[in-house]
Structures are given as C-alpha cells and as structure tokens.
Amino acid sequence: MIQITIIGSGNVAQHLIKAFSASKIIEIKQVFSRKKEALHHLIEFEKIIDDYNHLQTADLHIIAVSDNAISEVSEQLPFNNQLVVHTSGTSSIELLNEKNRRGVFYPLQTFSKTKEVDFSIIPFCLEAENTADFKLLETVAKSISTAVYSISSEQRKALHVAAVFVNNFTNHLYHLGQEICEENQLPFAILRPLIQETADKINTLDPVDAQTGPAKRHDSNTTEAHLAFLQDENKKNIYKILTQSIQHNGKKL
Amino acid sequence: MIQITIIGSGNVAQHLIKAFSASKIIEIKQVFSRKKEALHHLIEFEKIIDDYNHLQTADLHIIAVSDNAISEVSEQLPFNNQLVVHTSGTSSIELLNEKNRRGVFYPLQTFSKTKEVDFSIIPFCLEAENTADFKLLETVAKSISTAVYSISSEQRKALHVAAVFVNNFTNHLYHLGQEICEENQLPFAILRPLIQETADKINTLDPVDAQTGPAKRHDSNTTEAHLAFLQDENKKNIYKILTQSIQHNGKKL
C-alpha cells in the first residue's frame, strides 16, 4: 500500500480523501486539519491531527490548502527529504520549501462542496523533481483517474489561465444570461438545454467549427439590435468585445 | 393528423423534418426547397417542391429560412388567411406578411448538420395572433418536445440576447482556451472535463453560487499574474473586463 498524508480540509482535500478511500492501493495515513470535526464524516477520527508535531512521514504528503498558505505550511512540516506536493493550478513547484523533495499533484476541476465529482475523468497534472517521485505520483493519480498528464510549472500556469476562460468566465456568462432572463420575466431553465448542448458540442467538434451566431455570420443588423436592447453598460461592453473577438478570430483562421 | 408544410432546407428545416417524421400526430404535407437533392434522404421525393405555385395549404406552414429572407418568402406564399409561422429567435412576428394568420415557432437550440439533437428537451417558444392558432402550435410542439413556452416577441428578443451570451460567447471562450493550450503545447482535451462540469453544475446550482476562481475571490495576485502571462491584447482585454464584471456582480448580490 502507498501511504499518503493530506494536509488541509477544504474542497480539494475532502474530494481527495473520498477518492483515495476508494482506491485499493492507497492507505490514508494521516490528515492534518485545524478543525477536526470538518473531516470526521470522511475518515477515522484518530487519523485526524491538528498539531504539526504529530505528523509522521508517509510515501507522499499532499498539501491541499489555499495558494497563499502553501509556502508556510511546507516550511512547518517536521521532516526533511520526504516527497511533498501541492495541488494548486497557479503556484510554482518552487513555492514548496526545499528541505523536502517537491512535486505538484493538480486535479484540473472545479470542486464544490454540494456536488459529487466523478474523479475517474478528472485530468491530473503532475510534476516532480526526480523520476522516481514522478512515477509514484503517476501510480497514485492513475489509481483514481484515467486522465494523467506530465505538465511543467510553466505549462500549468498557461493551463490555469485557459481554465479561467472556459470555467470561471463561462460561468459568469451563464450568470449574465440569467440576469437578462429575469429582467424579462423569463425562467432561466429555458436556457439550460442550450448551455448543455454548447458544452456537449465540443466533445465532437473543435470550438471554431462549433461557432454559430450573429457575430460569426457578421450579421450587423442583429448585433446592432442586441446592443440597442442591452441597457446595462457592462453587458453592452462585454457584448461588443466578444463580438469583435469572434469576428477577428474568424478572419485569422 | 395535423398537416404541416415546411419552407426551407437548412439546419432547422432538416431537424424539424426528422422530428415531425417521428411524431404520430403530424403529417408532413410538402417541403419547399430550391435544392430538392438536399432533402431527399429525409423525405419522399414527391413531397419536395421548388416552385411556390405548387404549394398547397396545410394546417400549419413553417418558414425555416434565414432571418433576412423571412419577409420575402412570406409574401410569396400563394394563399391567404392560413397559419404561417417563422422559426427565428430575432425576428418579430410582424415580419411575416399580414395576408396570412401569423405566429412564431422558435426552437431555442444550436443546430449543426453533423450532430444529432435530442428534440424532446429543446425549449419551443411559441407566439400566435389568436388562441386557436396558439393551441395548434402548442399541440405540434408538445408532440416533439416536453419544454413548450408562450413567449412574446419582446421576450423572445431578450431570450435571443441571453442565448448569445450563454452559447455563442461561451463557445468563443472555449476557442480562446484552446488557443492558450495550443500556444503552450497542451492538448485541448485536458480542458474538456472542466467544460462539461461547468455546464453540468448549473443544473443543480444557480450560476452565482457556482462561481469560483481568482476574480470571485478578489485574489489580485493571481489575476495580475494571469494578465502578465497573457501576451495577446485581445485576450488581456477580455480577461480584464470579465474579471471586473464578476467582481462588480459579486458586490451587488
């Protein structure tokens, strides 16, 4: 069995605890959490610790805390020359204290407490300073997911920016669509099948081939009518800039 | 049986022909197409006509052509006082020639030739000038879909704008995400599960509750690092404006 210790109790930590608990080759040795109660529905209470001095070494130590806490947490670990990784999309491997062997174990997904996630399709982006450590991370990731990638810190930064576009920004467009519906006494539910189909389409089509709509058609009658319809300056501005971007990209390709 | 004639041979016309062919209460009487061959895989050849003078009356005549052709096509129909509808999200009911009884039969979905669509969940937005005609449109729509709505021309305009945000603009964000991946030797496939989960989430969460990411967290270290990473002025600009919009909306709520 590969012994893993997890430091953290947030969304990512909790989802990892669940996924590892179901793996046949992994044993969760300890979980560090300031709030022990936050985790006792997920793991035996005696495995949860809240004092760094009680941390024992394992094959792999996963720091799943917010970006700005990674550096300090990695410094506080009471051991040297062990394998320590973080789970962040934005942070460099360098952020980890160099007294230990370092790596990254980044699951590229959006986690929320209230929704179950199918780990088997989540891409894991791995990085390590030496081959043996990378192999161990690969074995661990493959025991819970079928999509495992070797990604450098520089590539991971690019990937996180791309993820902001397709996840955070996309979700915000859903929010703006909802506002437009509610301002006009339309149920947001009416847009849900369209949102689903828009996402489904790019499983079989390249986004550029899936692009439709008035911007793509250079149908200025419609885009001008839409801009006249939008009262809110912020939505008007977003409409203009994304329309121009679609038309600019269309020309380039 | 309700007899329906379809005028047009594009994506919407073809998807409607397929859906109606499977309905037990609908008979497709005729289909008008300039290019008869475009449709003969979908319907008996003798039902396809290419001369307006051969059009017979039916219970319902559906004009499924591009927005700028609706007016002229509706004028050319060789009959009066029949029920004639268009399928457009942007065009007013008024665009139809008033020699016939007018209506709108708008399926809110993005259609592409290469991908099958599950009609049963597509929202149909209906409008008619009198109650009997509305009832007929409702019966027809309910025979192929479970999501049927009464939507005025004014509401339909709002809905179309909202659809541009959640469909056309969202797809363009996928495209920008793909560009960032390719510029950094990353496979776009790595983003697909995230895109899928982003869309799935809003089936159970409101978009505002599903919002995550550096903009929402007001994590300016990350947003500034992302802006510094983005070389392209267009992507930088879109990143800035959507980040501000997320933060502005966050405050309002």
Image (tube, coloured by chain):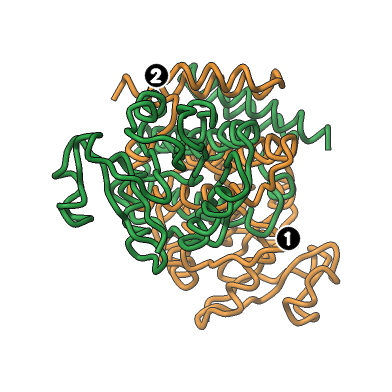
Chain colours: A green, B orange
Q: Which image quadrant is residue B217 in?
A: top left
Q: Which residue is mark 2?
A: B248
Are tags 2 and 1 found on a single chain?
Answer: yes
State whether residue A76 is above or below residue B137.
above
- How crowded pointer 2 is (Cα within 10 Å; few <14, some 14-19, many 20+) is rated as some
State whether residue B199 is above or below residue A241.
below
| Rendered residue at 51%/37% (across/down) | A102
| Rendered residue at 52%/51% (across/down) | A137
Place of residue A55 in the rendered image (x, y in percent of width and height, measured from the top left): 27, 41
State whether residue B132 is above or below residue B176.
below
Q: Amino acid at mark 1?
A: Gly
Q: Which residue is mark 1?
A: B8
- Is residue A42 shown left or right of residue B159? left
Q: Amino acid at mark 2?
A: His
Indicate the chain on which mark 1 is placed: B
Q: Which part of the image, by quadrant, shows the C terminus of chain A?
A: top right
- Is residue B114 shown left or right of residue A195? right
Q: Nearer the viewer, residue A21 or A232?
A: A21
Q: CA distance from mark 2 to mark 1?
A: 44 Å
> Is residue A183 in view?
yes
- Is residue B249 shown left or right of residue A226? left
Indicate the chain on which mark 2 is placed: B
Asked which secondary structure carries label 2, the reply is: helix
Asked which secondary structure carries label 1, the reply is: loop
